[in-house]
Image (cartoon, rainbow, N blue to C red):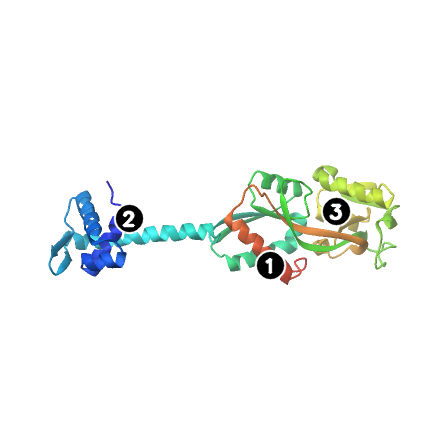
Amino acid sequence: MPPELRHLRYFVAVAEHRSFTRAAVALRVAQQSLSQQVAVLERSLGVRLFDRDTRGARLTEVGEVFLPEARAVLARADEAVGTVGRAVRGEIGRLSLAFLVSTANYMLPPVVRAFRERFPEVGLHTEDVGIAQLVTGLRERRYDAAFTRPPLVDDLATRTLVTEPVCAVLPSGHPLARRSELRLRDLADEPWVLTSPDSWPPWHRKYDRDFHRAGFTPDVVARATGVPHLLGLVAAGLGVSRLASSARSLRRTGVVFVPLADERAETVVVWDPAAPKPVLRNLLDVVTDLATTIDLTHAG
């Protein structure tokens, strides 16, 4: 039977103090108990580790060989316990993060940079994905957290990081492009470019409610596969659209962003509350602190 760690600790203590009496005091155990446990170790190994006399305890030749091995085992055990503690505190581990395609451009660099500075030994995997893939990945636990517009679902937890204006997106040269502000109803007679309703139905149901409150149903002349495609279609003059102001970083020419009165968009961090993870708690703390110190919509 392999020796127990406590037997190794007792053996090392006696070897270092060269005395059962002094080792017992240091370990805060009875000397008789200490002697008995060292004897158990010797019997399990089938060797004598100490020569005992009135002057104390001296290592035998086998004991001298065994001492560095026992110390190495104890050091490795202490290291393992320390590693567990670091894992519990979220100082080591791995995180898989998803970024909505339209937010990755400005959100990914500061988030990854800040987290790596605080927790350099946590491995980070990042992807930029569409909203449907993002939500599915969180539910299937392929992603630990995601940065996105609010997904508008009930089973995932969210924390708001950024609130920014929503803008009408117009082709350059459009008659309304010089306005300092618009209302959604000002665009009632315009052709519209939107993403497909199948891209994420909860969002499109919200869009429908917004258009209904503004008093019209949009004339959708083209459907885009994503925000970059949508901006290209607007720049081509096919129609107008509506996006968060940070989307302007994805295209510098051919389009104009005009704020829509009283409309705001959020960027949130999303996670599955049923899948807690120590490193995730640290991520949430880091990004919450980050959001209070810099404007994340311009930080990338």
Judging depth in this view, the residue of 51 and 36 nearest the camera is 36
Mark 1 or 2: in front is 2
Q: Residue 230 carries which label?
A: 3
On the image, the x and y values in percent for residue 109 come to: 60, 56
Along the polypeptide, which appears first: circle 1 or circle 2?
2
Residue positioned most to the top: 198
> Would you call the spot at circle 3 few (<14 residues within 10 Å), some (14-19), or many (20 or more)?
many
Q: Which mark is residue 289?
A: 1
Q: Which amino acid does label 3 sit on?
A: Leu
Residue drawn at x 85%, y 52% as measured from the top left = 183
Mark 1 or 3: in front is 1
The answer to which image quadrant residue 289 occupies is: bottom right
Q: What residue type is labelled 1?
A: Asp
Q: Which mark is residue 299?
A: none
CA gap, disc 1 to disc 2? 43 Å
CA gap, disc 2 to disc 3? 65 Å
Q: Report whether 163 appears left or right of 70.
A: right
Residue drawn at x 82%, y 41% as measured from the top left = 221
On the image, the x and y values in percent for residue 112 come to: 56, 55
Residue drawn at x 72%, y 53% as measured from the top left = 247
Residue 250, above or below 136 = below
The reply to whether discs 1 and 2 touch (Cβ–Cβ < 8 Å) is: no
Helix, strand or loop at mark 2 = helix
Q: Report whether 220 appears left or right of 33.
A: right
Q: Name the residue under label 2.
A: 5
On the image, the x and y values in percent for residue 76 come to: 32, 52
Judging depth in this view, the residue of 190 and 140 nearest the camera is 140
Helix, strand or loop at mark 3 = helix
Which quarter of the image is occupied by the N terminus?
top left
